[in-house]
């Protein structure tokens, strides 16, 4: 079977409430589901991809900051970088461009998870 796309990527976070605030207020995602009792939240962006947040649970081997990289689509990478800087977000290195394809900026969230902001520039041609 060939996968057609990603349905849900999720991160383990140290504090679900702080993480929800970070991803909604700073990253601009929309909260779709939030179950504080179970330590779970789902957020989405304009393109419909889902991001899940799970409360850290050491007993089950779920430690915050130990995850795969999640990419978040943006319309303008340079504007997004400026917004992240204004919010005090830790950026890693300089933006990278793959000509005719994407522009990317790596950052670290409040729990040490690595993320990438990605601007699809193949649509600009």
Image: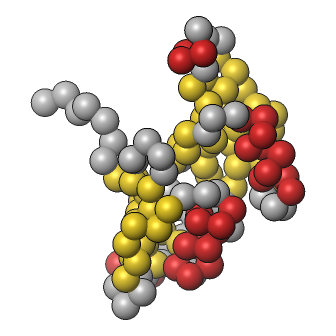
Quarter of the rendering occupied by the C terminus: top right
Quarter of the rendering occupied by the N terminus: top left
- At 60% from the left and 20% from the top, the residue drawn is 121
- At 56% from the left and 82% from the top, the residue drawn is 17
In depth, the one of 104 and 86 nearer the eye is: 86
Quick check: 80 above or below 29?
above
- At 63% from the left and 35% from the top, the residue drawn is 75
Quick check: 3 above or below 61?
above
Q: Is residue 38 left or right of residue 92?
A: left
User: Which quarter of the picture shows residue 18?
Assistant: bottom right
Residue 112 at x, y percent in the picture:
65, 62
Report how many numbered discs are placed on residues in the image: 0
Q: Is residue 78 left or right of residue 72?
A: right
Taking the image as drawn, is residue 81 in sight?
Answer: yes
Taking the image as drawn, is residue 111 in sight?
Answer: no
Residue 86 at x, y percent in the picture:
86, 57
């Amino acid at each position: 079977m060939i996968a057609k796309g990603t349905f849900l990527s999720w991160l383990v976070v140290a504090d679900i409430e702080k993480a929800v605030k970070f991803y909604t207020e700073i990253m601009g995602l929309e909260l779709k589901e939030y179950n504080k009792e179970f330590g779970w939240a789902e957020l989405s962006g304009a393109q419909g991809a889902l991001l899940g947040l799970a409360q850290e649970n050491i007993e089950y081997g779920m430690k915050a900051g130990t995850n795969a990289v999640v990419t978040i689509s943006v319309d303008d990478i340079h504007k997004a970088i400026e917004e992240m800087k204004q919010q005090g977000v830790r950026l890693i290195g300089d933006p990278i461009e793959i000509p005719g394809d994407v522009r990317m900026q790596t950052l670290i969230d409040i729990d040490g998870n690595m993320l990438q902001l990605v601007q699809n520039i193949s649509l600009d041609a």
